[in-house]
């Protein structure tokens, strides 16, 4: 009987030592926030503090104020009207920061072969680059890379997950 209680105690100890508190999670989030150039944590309003905003010309500024990603249809690399709107705003934002260069990441969902999805991701990234160049962004400022299906944004084997993984993401270099 004593052995049973001891086993339960040890199991509870192991499980509790693996969990983190909300404060520990927020410390980790704060480090991420600072790395991305955010001047104050977006979580600070939870504690009643005013959120100050984001450093201009940073990845965080792009994500929050413009949007860093567009989405594609299944087996498609053409740009939707919604994507064109986001890319128009990205081009205007990039025009404000002429010293910044970007990399456009092309991604695909998990369906299809690795090689096919790498090629599709490349076509997606290239279509974003071509559009930005057509809007007047210097081609030397825009790089592309394809990750195919190797870096899903959302895990899952369903239509919702796949739709979120068929994307182009703009990253500041």
Image: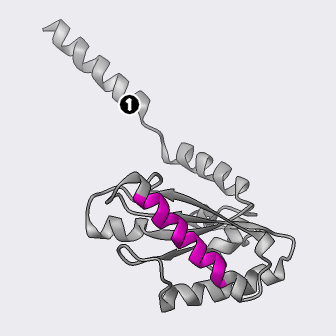
Q: Is residue 27 magenta?
A: no
Q: Residue at x 57, y 50 (%)?
A: 26
Q: Which residues are magenta?
A: 116-131
Mark 1 surroundings: few (<14), some (14-19) or many (≥20) residues within 10 A: few
Quadrant in which residue 75 is drawn: bottom left
Q: Secondary structure at mark 1?
A: helix
Residue 109 vs 20, above or below: the answer is below
- Prevailing secondary structure class for the magenta stretch in the rendered image: helix
Q: Is residue 55 above or below residue 145?
A: below
Residue drawn where x is 62% and y is 84% of the image: 87
- Specify whether 39 is left or right of 155: right
Query: Please, is residue 85 above or below residue 132 in the view?
Result: below
Quadrant of residue 127 within the rendered picture: bottom right
Reply yes or no: does residue 123 show up in magenta: yes
Report x, y in % for residue 56: 79, 73
- 93 or 141: nearer the viewer: 141
Residue under pointer 1 = 16
- Indicate the quadrant containing the N terminus: top left, top right, bottom left or bottom right: top left
**100 or 1: nearer the eye?**
100
Image-based side of 46 in relation to 38, left or right: left
Instruction: Name the residue furthest top.
Output: 2
Is residue 67 shown to the viewer in this render? no
Camera-side residue: 11 or 104? 104
**Viewer-nearest residue: 43 or 145:** 145
Eyeballing the image, is 26 above or below 153? above
Quadrant in the picture for the C terminus: bottom right
């Amino acid at each position: 009987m004593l052995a049973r209680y001891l086993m339960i105690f040890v199991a509870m100890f192991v499980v509790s030592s693996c969990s983190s508190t909300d404060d520990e999670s927020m410390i980790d989030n704060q480090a991420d926030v600072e790395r991305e150039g955010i001047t104050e944590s977006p979580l600070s309003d939870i504690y009643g503090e005013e959120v100050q905003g984001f450093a201009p010309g940073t990845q965080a500024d792009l994500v929050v104020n413009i949007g860093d990603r567009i989405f594609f249809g299944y087996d498609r690399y053409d740009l939707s009207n919604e994507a064109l709107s986001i890319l128009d705003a990205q081009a205007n934002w990039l025009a404000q920061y002429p010293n910044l260069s970007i990399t456009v990441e092309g991604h695909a969902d998990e369906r299809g072969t690795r090689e096919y999805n790498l090629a599709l991701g490349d076509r997606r990234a290239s279509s974003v680059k071509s559009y930005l160049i057509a809007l007047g962004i210097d081609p030397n400022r825009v790089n592309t890379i394809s990750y195919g299906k190797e870096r899903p944004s959302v895990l899952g084997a369903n239509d919702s997950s796949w739709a979120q993984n068929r994307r182009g993401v703009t990253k500041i270099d």
